[in-house]
Amino acid sequence: MRRNLLTDPPSLLPLPLSAGQGGGLVGRYIMSSRILINQGDLAEARNELVDALLLMPDEHKLYFKLGQVNRQLGLTQAAIAAYESAIRIHPGYIQAHYGLASLYRNQQRWDEASVMYEKIAEIDPSAARPYFEVGIMFHELGLFEKGQHPWLRHSV
């Protein structure tokens, strides 16, 4: 049963927020969705996130969490849309870029995955993970020589 978030906020609230979780209502909805996910109730977690986004449509962290839940539910296109929304709202939100890159990679959309990993490297030039992920991707494609890709030549 879906509830009206204006009159009946998540039953799991108030919840203590862990360090780095963020504060306020957004953090509480994210924590609430995590609890539902841990209980195996992905559909209800998704419903709560969708409802929360009706109240707070510009919250990139809610879209990111919705992308994760959609992915777990096998709703790939919905997950992509959620990650793209998080990136549109906050272009520097690296977690959404990783989520989108990973989805593209799993779908063997290599060019799109590579572009996302390049954007991650632009956002955080000191991050090693995007180079590692692209290296793994090329290994999966049978392109064993790192120098075959101009972007990777600059990573060493």
Image (spheres, rainbow, N blue to C red):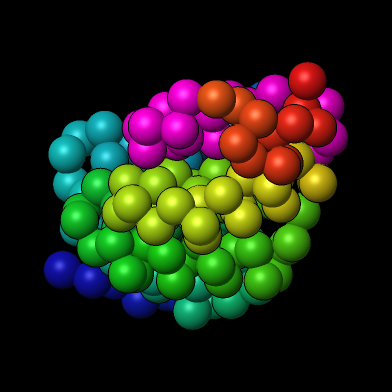
Percent x, y for residue 17?
59, 33
Quadrant placement of the N terminus:
bottom left
Percent x, y for residue 92?
76, 54
Residue found 60% across the figure and 27% down from its top: 146
Residue found 60% across the figure and 53% down from its top: 116
Quadrant placement of the C terminus:
top right
Magenta-span inclusion, residue 143? yes
Q: Relative to 52, does residue 24 appear above or below in the rendering?
A: above
Along the line of sight, the residue nearer the viewer: 142 or 7: 142
In the visual, does 78 lie left or right of 7? Answer: left
Whether residue 22 appears in this view of the structure is: no
Along the line of sight, the residue nearer the viewer: 77 or 38: 77
Residue found 55% across the figure and 68% down from its top: 84
Magenta-span inclusion, residue 48? no
Percent x, y for residue 48?
35, 62
How many discs appear?
0
Whether residue 155 appears in this view of the structure is: yes
Occupied quadrant, residue 73: bottom left
What's drawn in magenta, residue-wise?
A: 124-144
Along the line of sight, the residue nearer the viewer: 10 or 99: 99
Percent x, y for residue 119?
71, 51
Occupied quadrant, residue 150: top right
Q: Relative to 127, does residue 56 appear above or below in the rendering?
A: below
In the visual, does 61 lie left or right of 91? Answer: left
Residue found 30% across the figure and 54% down from its top: 107
